[in-house]
Image (tube, rainbow, N blue to C red):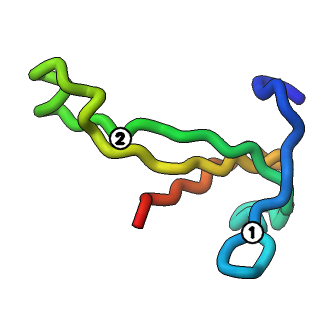
Amino acid sequence: MGLFSEKSKTIDLGGEPMQCLVCGNDHFWQRDAQLNTAGLTFLGLDWANASAVCCVCDGCGYIHWFLPK
């Protein structure tokens, strides 16, 4: 399982199973990632930055980033 403690899983995107854009695999680990900006980091306000959802491919490790709507 590598760097992740849980098992990878399939992810539903609008009613269709997600597939990796690089290798076509269909199992991913899901994580949140903070999108830091220089201005807020300089002011010590990193917590105020937006976050994205990252789906890491279990096959090749490619990271798919999704911004919240």
29 horizontally vs 51: left or right = right
From the top left corner, tell me how far across and down residue 22 is, in percent: 72, 62
Of residue 52 and residue 23, the one placed in the foreground of this image is: 52
Q: Quadrant of residue 49?
A: top left
Q: What residue type is labelled 1?
A: Asp
Is 26 situated above or below 32? below
Residue farthest bottom in this picture: 15
Residue located at (77% from left, 68% from top): 19
Residue located at (12% from left, 22% from top): 42
* Closer to the eye: label 1 or 2: 1
From the top left corner, tell me how far across and down residue 26 is, in percent: 85, 62
From the top left corner, tell me how far across and down residue 53 is, in percent: 54, 50
Is 59 situated above or below 66? above
Q: In which quarter of the image is residue 1?
A: top right
Residue farthest top in this picture: 44
32 horizontally vs 4: left or right = left
Q: What residue type is labelled 2?
A: Leu
Q: What element carries label 1?
A: strand
Q: Is mark 2 on a helix, strand or loop?
A: loop
Which residue bears the numbered disc 1?
12
Label 1: few (<14), some or many (≥20) within 10 Å? few
Which residue bears the numbered disc 2?
35
